């Protein structure tokens, strides 16, 4: 049976939880559209996170890789459009590292695009009533780092598609007035994203960019 790799991250920045780790663990072993999900939790550390991701890709030989991370403060599920070749950390990672204006891959291209059908995923989520939109930046912390590392690893493997999806806080993490989504909704959302990516090769063509 073909495999889909879904990764999350361990908690970081003083949090006790990371919704992305919970999602990856919940989806481990689940079947989606005839594919078996391999769920993995990556360290929230520059360098080590990509090493672990590549190890999992070698071991599980997935046809699709969806990396998930927490974007506290965002109100929606946000498939990322583009990974950039920059590490620029506002806070230390879980190993104490705080790279500033460093490349993810020395000599690598400035950016890689997601090969997930990001607009079709957003449309599928909205149809189910789940708040979603395309994000134009995954930031410059460990999530963008892993997203770039993923697309760099897949650059010559055209048959394997991959990308990154940010998710909001869980209700128990959100402070007063901060947006969140229940875990069950996020698990459903990532399941639907995987299913959409497996079922369609081409993205939907819909205007969706921000005007600023
Ligand atoms: N979110 C962070 C890193 C790990 C995570 O879940 C980010 O957005 O970079």
Image (cartoon, rainbow, N blue to C red):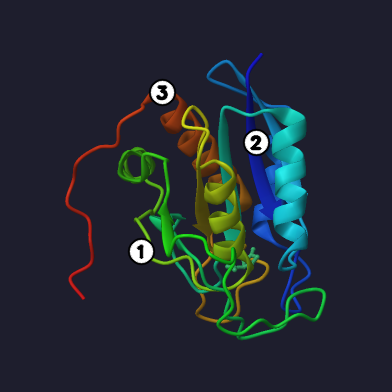
Q: Is residue 121 visible?
A: yes
Q: What element carries label 1?
A: loop
Residue under the point 22% across and 55% down: 208
Q: Is mark 2 within 8 Å of ligand 1?
A: no
The spot of residue 32 in percent (x, y) is 57, 24
Q: Name the residue under label 2.
A: 5
Residue 111 vertical position relative to residue 53 in the rendered view, above or below: below
Q: Is mark 2 on a helix, strand or loop?
A: strand
Examine the image and state in which quarter residue 55 appears: top right
Q: Quadrant of ligand 1?
A: bottom right
Residue under the point 67% across and 84% down: 91
Examine the image and state in which quarter residue 70 appears: bottom right
The spot of residue 192 in percent (x, y) is 47, 35
What is the number of the mark on residue 136? 1
Residue under the point 17% across and 70% down: 211
**Cα separation between marks 1 and 2:** 23 Å
Upstream in sequence: badge 1 or badge 2? 2
The spot of residue 60 in percent (x, y) is 73, 29
Upstream in sequence: badge 3 or badge 2? 2
Q: Name the residue under label 3.
A: 199
Quarter that holds the C terminus: bottom left
């Amino acid at each position: 049976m073909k495999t889909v790799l879904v990764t999350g991250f361990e908690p970081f920045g003083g949090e006790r939880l990371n919704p992305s780790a919970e999602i990856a663990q919940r989806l481990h072993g689940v079947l989606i559209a005839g594919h078996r999900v391999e769920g993995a939790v990556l360290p929230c550390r520059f360098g080590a996170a990509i090493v672990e991701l590549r190890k999992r890709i070698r071991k599980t030989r997935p046809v699709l890789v969806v990396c998930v991370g927490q974007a506290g403060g965002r109100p929606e599920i946000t498939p990322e459009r583009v990974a950039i070749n920059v590490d620029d950390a506002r806070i230390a990672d879980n190993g104490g590292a705080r790279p500033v204006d460093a490349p993810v891959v020395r000599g690598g291209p400035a950016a890689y695009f997601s090969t997930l059908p990001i607009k079709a995923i957003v449309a599928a989520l909205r149809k189910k009533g789940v708040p979603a939109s395309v994000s134009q930046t995954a930031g410059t912390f460990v999530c963008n780092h892993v997203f770039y590392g993923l697309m760099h690893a897949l650059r010559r493997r055209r048959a394997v598609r991959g990308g990154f999806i940010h998710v909001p806080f869980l209700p128990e993490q959100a402070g007063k007035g901060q947006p969140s989504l229940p875990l069950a909704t996020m698990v459903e959302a990532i399941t639907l994203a995987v299913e959409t990516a497996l079922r369609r090769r081409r993205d939907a063509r819909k205007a969706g960019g921000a005007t600023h």
